[in-house]
Amino acid sequence: MTATSKVSIAVPTGALMPGALRLLSRAGLARLSAELLGRQLMVDRSGVRVILVRPADVPAYVDHGAADLGIVGKDILWETPGAHYELVDLRFGGCRMVLAVPEASKLNGPETWPPQLRVATKYPRTAVAWFEARGQAVEVVQLHGSVELAPQVGLVDAIVDLTATGRTLKENRLRIAATLGASTARLIANQASLKTRTERVQAAVGRLREAVEK
Amino acid sequence: MRDAQESVLSEMRRWGYRHVITPMVESTDVLELGIGAEQRRRLFKFADARGEVLALVGERTVPVARLVAGKLRGSALPLRLCYAGPVLSTDEGGFQQRRETYQVGAELVGAPGPVADAEVIALAARCLQASGVQRYQVDVGHAEFFQGIMDAVKLPDEVKAQVRAALAARDFVALEALLDKTPLRSAEHELLLRFPALRGGSEMLETAGGLVRNKRSERALAELAEVQKLLVAHGLGEVVSLDLGAIRDFDYYTGIIFEGYGPEVGRPVAQGGRYDGLLERFGRAAPATGFVVQLDLIWEMLTRAPRPPALPQIDAAVAWTGSGLTTALKLGSTLRLFGMRAVVDTQARDQAQAKAWWQAVGAVNLIHCRSGATVSWTARGGRTKTLPPEQVAGRLAGGLA
C-alpha cells in the first residue's frame, strides 16, 4: 500500500492519457498537463498523488497496492485479470477488439474457419479465451507490434487486434471478420484500499463517477 | 517468519485450540469433496504407483474436515483445532510469484451461532495482534445477505449466473450493464451496485435494513448485529467494521464471513467464515467456522514496518584456544541449561582473532577460554574481566533473571 495518506491514482501513458487527465481535472482531483506529468512521472496535489505508468502496468500497480486507483483500458483488463475491483466505465478511449483477415481471404464467420486457425496477436489470453468459448482450435502467435503485417506475409490466417477507427486495418488491406468485444477506459481499485482507506478512496471514486456522468 | 508462526499458534493454544498436523498430500477425490472447480484446477496433481491421482494440498480446511470426520470421529464436538503449514498452488499468484505459501489456521467445528462466530473472529484479530502487526482491522460480513438479495432480485436464472460471475470477478461495470438490461429495478438492484461501498460501522446495518425486503438478508443482518455486539464485549470494537459487500466464494460459505487487513499490503492477510455444509460431505454433519492467516503476507508487513523485527539475539560466543576447548564445551552446556543461546567456536583462536569472530557472530557476550582456571569475559560495550567460568555463567544467568 502507498505510504502516503493521499489517494494515489495510476494514469496510463499513450492514447488514454489525455482523456484521463481531462477526467481528473473535471472531477476536481488534479489539474495536470501531460507535459508536466510526462516529465515528473509522479505529481502530488492536495489529497491526491498521480503516477504515470505504461498502460499494461496499471493493473500491476493497483493489484499490488502501489496505487489505490487506476485508469486503464478494458482491453488490458481482459489480458491481465487480477484481484482489483472494476468500478466505473469512464466512457472514453472507445475501441474494439476484432478478428481481422486479409481483404481477399475467404474467412468470415465461424462456419468458414479451418479446423485449426492461426492467429497473430498482442493479446493472446483474450484471443484464446474467445476462441475456446466457441470451440475453435487456435494456434496463437504472440507478437509485440506491427501485427497487421503478419497475415500479409503468410505468417497467420488472421489477427486479433484493437482498433478504434479501422484505418490502420484498411491501410494494411485487412477487413474485420468478427468483433470480440468493445473496450473503453475503466476505473479500477485496489481491494484493500477500498477496505482500509474507505472514505478517502470512495470520495475520489464518487467524484470521478460524477465527472463521467456530467 | 517462524517466530510469527509461533506467536500465532501460541495465541491459538491459549484459546484452547489443539494443534493438528494434516498431510501435505491428499487424494484428489477427498479434496474435490470440499473445493470448487477453480481451486481444483490450481492443485499440483500427480499419480501414485497404483494410478490414483494425488495432489499437494492447496488449503488445509478440507484435510481438517476429513480428520474430524475420520480419525477424530470419536471425539465429542465442539472441537477446537489449529494447524500450520505450507500450501501449494500451480498459479504463482502474480503477487509474490510464490507457488508455496505458509498458512496458519484455526477451525471451530460443531458450534453453531453468533457466539462461536464471534469467538473465531476475535481469535483471528488476536492472532494478527500476536504476530506483531502494528495496525490491523477486521471486516465482518455475511454470505446469506448476498444470497437473500439474489433470491429477491427478479432475474432469469442465466442472468443471475452472469451477475454472480461479474461479482466474483469484481467487475461492477459488467454488473451494471447486466442490471440495466432488466426492466425491474428494486432496492436490491441498488444494493448490488453499491456492493463495494457497503462498508462501515453499525449504521450500515440500518442503511441496509431499510433497503432489503427479504427474510434471508434480514436474518443475516440480525446475526451481524449480534456478532458485532459480542466483538465489542471481546474488546475489539475498535478494530471491527462491517462489510456487507465482501465478495467471497459464496458456494462454500454459509454464514458470517470476515477478512483481516493490515497496513502496507494490498490484500487480506486473514480470511475466514462459517461453512456449515462441508463436514456433511465427509459423513459427519456439523456446523463449522474457521480462518487462515497468510503468514507470508504477515512477514512482508513486519519486514516493511518502520522497525522490522530483529533476529533472535545470541547471548554468548564462546571462543577457545589450546586446552580451553574442554572448558568452552562445558560452559556452552551450562549456559544452554540456563536457557541462553550460546555458540561455541569450531576452531582455536587467540584473543584478538576471537574478538573479530565475536563481531561476526553478533553475540552479546564473548567468553575466551584458555588453558588454566580462568576465562576472559567481555560484554558488549564493557571491559574485559578475568574470572573462573562458573562465575561467568552465574553472572550471565543472573543478568538474565
Image: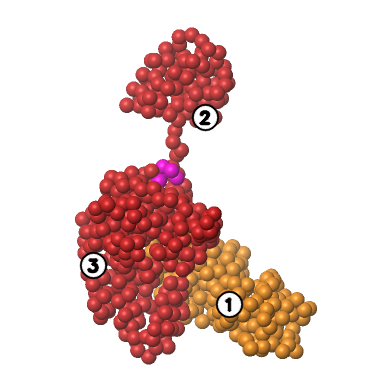
Residue B99 shows which numbered tag? none
Q: Is residue A146 visible?
A: yes
First along the sequence among labels 3 and 2: 3
- In the image, the chain rendered in orange is A
- What is the magenta range? B1-5
Q: Position of residue B196 (x, y in %)?
A: 38, 71
Measuring 51% from the left and 16% from the top, which residue is drawn there?
B325
Residue furthest to the right in view is A153
Quarter where residue B264 is shown: bottom left
Q: Which residue is mark 2?
A: B361
Q: Chain of mark 3?
A: B
| Element under disc 2 | helix
Give the residue pinned by disc 1. A132
Mark 2 and mark 1 residues within 8 Å of each other at the beta carbon: no
The color chain B is rendered in: red
Mark 3 residue type: Glu
How crowded pointer 1 is (Cα within 10 Å; few <14, some 14-19, many 20+) is rated as few
Q: Are marks 2 and 1 on the same chain?
A: no
What x and y, as percent, mark residue A193? 42, 64
Give the alpha-carbon distance from disc 3 to disc 2, as whole Å: 56 Å
